[in-house]
Image (cartoon, helix red, strand yellow):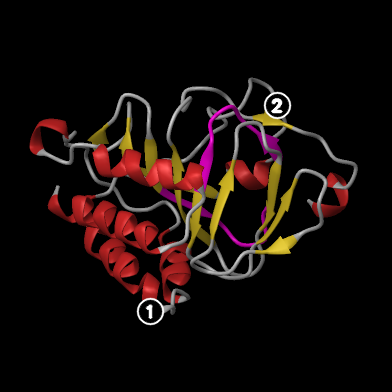
Amino acid sequence: MNRIKNLILEIIAYLEKKKLNADENQICKDLKNLQLSNVNYRNLKANNPPFKKSLFKALDTVKENSLIPIKESIYSSLNSLKWNIDNGSYYEKDCDIGNDYLMGNMNTELIGPKNGHFISTELKLGLFLLEPNIFYKDHKHEAPELYLNLTPGTEWRFNNCKWENQAPGSIVYNEPYKVHAMKIKDIPFLSIWCWPKNSSKKCMLVPRNDWKELE
């Protein structure tokens, strides 16, 4: 329990040092207000990360001094974490999220209603990894979303804007129903991820004309 708690506290400490907008700051406050105690801890059975090699490769790219405490806390908590693969349960039934995503994602919920190590009625906080060379299709959801990017080389697209790089340590906030997509290059994508509310709602794909050439 203590190792996972320490990882959560390191994430909060990092966010507190950043210049956050009002929505991001509220998420940080929500995290600080959660009880990280024995009473609120769910004793989940830990497992090996399905993409352990990619996880280690991603962590090896984390070089920024400000991210080292989070990196070290991830390493320290690895033997305590339960990893999951999204088999499409986050998406509307029969949507075409793509085999690359389905076969190349994993996450662990540090906090969550059903799968979190610490229990929250609605908020989800965890680690999210995508394998290299995956196009994560344009999608949206009712839940507001915060990403703290740990690895370099991933490109993002928001709404109809051009692709842009997000540096390690950058924070991405997606307000409800904001359309976003990712292109993962040679380095696996690893991030901290948070849905503070509406976390039971499904994601919806937003088709674009360039999907075939990107897959």
**Furthest-right residue in view?**
209
For discs 2 and 1, the disc positioned in front in the rendered view: 1
Q: Nearer the viewer, residue 76 or 201?
A: 201
- Sequence order check: which comes first, mark 2 or mark 1? 1
Mark 2 closeness class: few <14, some 14–19, many ≥20 residues within 10 Å:
few
Q: Is residue 48 left or right of residue 76?
A: right
Picture coordinates of residue 133, whole percent (x, y): 67, 61
Picture coordinates of residue 141, whole percent (x, y): 61, 30
- In the image, the segment drawn in magenta is 127-146
Residue 136 in view here: no
Compared with 95, 101 (above or below) is below
Instruction: Say which mark, if any, is on residue 15.
Output: none
Q: Amino acid at mark 2?
A: Cys
Instruction: Measure how far apart labels 2 and 1 are at the Cα level.
Output: 40 Å
Q: Nearer the viewer, residue 65 or 108?
A: 65
Pointer 2 with pointer 1, Cβ within 8 A: no
The quarter holding residue 118 reads top left
Which residue is found at the position 16% from the left and 32% from the top? 40
- Residue identified by numbered label 1: 65
Question: Magenta region's main secondary structure?
Answer: strand
Q: Is residue 18 left or right of residue 47?
A: right
Q: Is residue 49 magenta?
A: no
- Residue identified by numbered label 2: 95
Picture coordinates of residue 64, whole percent (x, y): 43, 78
Which residue is found at the position 77% from the left and 59% from the top? 163
Residue 123 in view here: yes
Mark 1 closeness class: few <14, some 14–19, many ≥20 residues within 10 Å:
few
Q: Amino acid at mark 1?
A: Asn
Which residue is found at the position 27% from the left and 49% from the top? 81
Dot 1: element:
helix
Q: Nearer the viewer, residue 95 or 40?
A: 40
